[in-house]
Amino acid sequence: MSKESVAGRAVVDRPSPNRDERPADAGPVDTLVLHYTGMVSAEAALARMTDPTARVSAHWCVGEDGTLWRLVSEERRAWHAGRSEWRGRRSVNDRSIGIELVNPGHEHGYRPFPPAQMDALLDLARAIVARHPIDPRNVVAHSDIAPTRRQDPGELFDWARLAQAGIGIWPEDAAPPVQAERALREGDSGAAVRLHQERLRAVGYGLVADGEFGATTAAVVRAFQRHYRQARIDGEIDAGTAAVIGQVHALALGQS
């Protein structure tokens, strides 16, 4: 156990060999990426993230009981994001801190993140954003930066609570009433599709605003819904999702 602490919480060092130096020209760390482990237990996840053959890691892991494990120094690059993009930058690992939250994930019995885990995460996240110039709009999910591949930490994660603590952004009205008009969906095209693509791209999603509602746009919309409209995750843009996209777009622009 480390002598260091986070808001009075002991830090348990579990060093991972899966790390390297951040590129010299990468710039400051400015992004915080949240994941879930997606494995049957904390020990299984820690074993994988410290296995040199797995070539995956994170800077931190937070147990369901609030335990804080440090795997990689924040000065080094951890291998948590994979193929990713946010706000026009790829290789998100270069400038980010990765936090894994112990949770079995959608494949092994996805469940809510318990209060002890969320409390510990808030303490850790506050400490991280105090150390690094992390813009609130750069507090993101793994699914936000890799929407065609990932869905973590998923729709049960309490993003609103983080934003209330000054970590990330959250719309004031995250679920406005749904109107009766037909939702935009995969296969649609036109100016309305392009407008929402442009707004999602301005928020940070890796998306081409071509006016064609293809599979990538649907994946991005699902990722957006998992973060900001968790009651409806269908990859379609109904009036409610359109309204939330507009709210988050306005908040993101206000941070720029």
Image: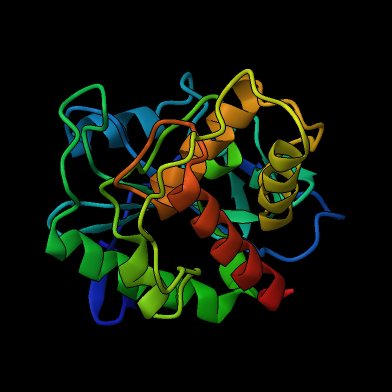
Query: Of residues 254 and 34, which is closer to you in this image?
Result: 254
Q: Residue furthest front?
A: 180
| Left or right relative to 55: residue 193 | right
In the rendering, at what x and y percent does residue 55 appear? 52, 26
Query: Of residues 199 and 155, which is closer to you in this image?
Result: 199
Q: Residue furthest right?
A: 25
Q: In this picture, is 188 found above or below 177?
A: above
Colouring scheme applied when the structure was drawn: rainbow
Q: In this picture, is 194 found above or below 12?
A: above
Query: Of residues 176 and 13, which is closer to you in this image?
Result: 176
- Give the residue at x 74% y 66%: 28
In the rendering, at what x and y percent does residue 50 appear? 39, 34
In the rendering, at what x and y percent does residue 254 appear? 68, 77
- Give the residue at x 79% y 35%: 208
Residue 97 in view? yes
Q: Quadrant of the C terminus?
A: bottom right
Marker count (numbered)? 0
Residue 59 in view? no
| Left or right relative to 170: residue 249 | right
Q: Quadrant of the N terminus?
A: bottom left
In the rendering, at what x and y percent does residue 39 appear? 25, 28
- Give the residue at x 54% y 29%: 219
Query: Of residues 201 and 90, which is closer to you in this image?
Result: 201
| Left or right relative to 44: residue 208 | right
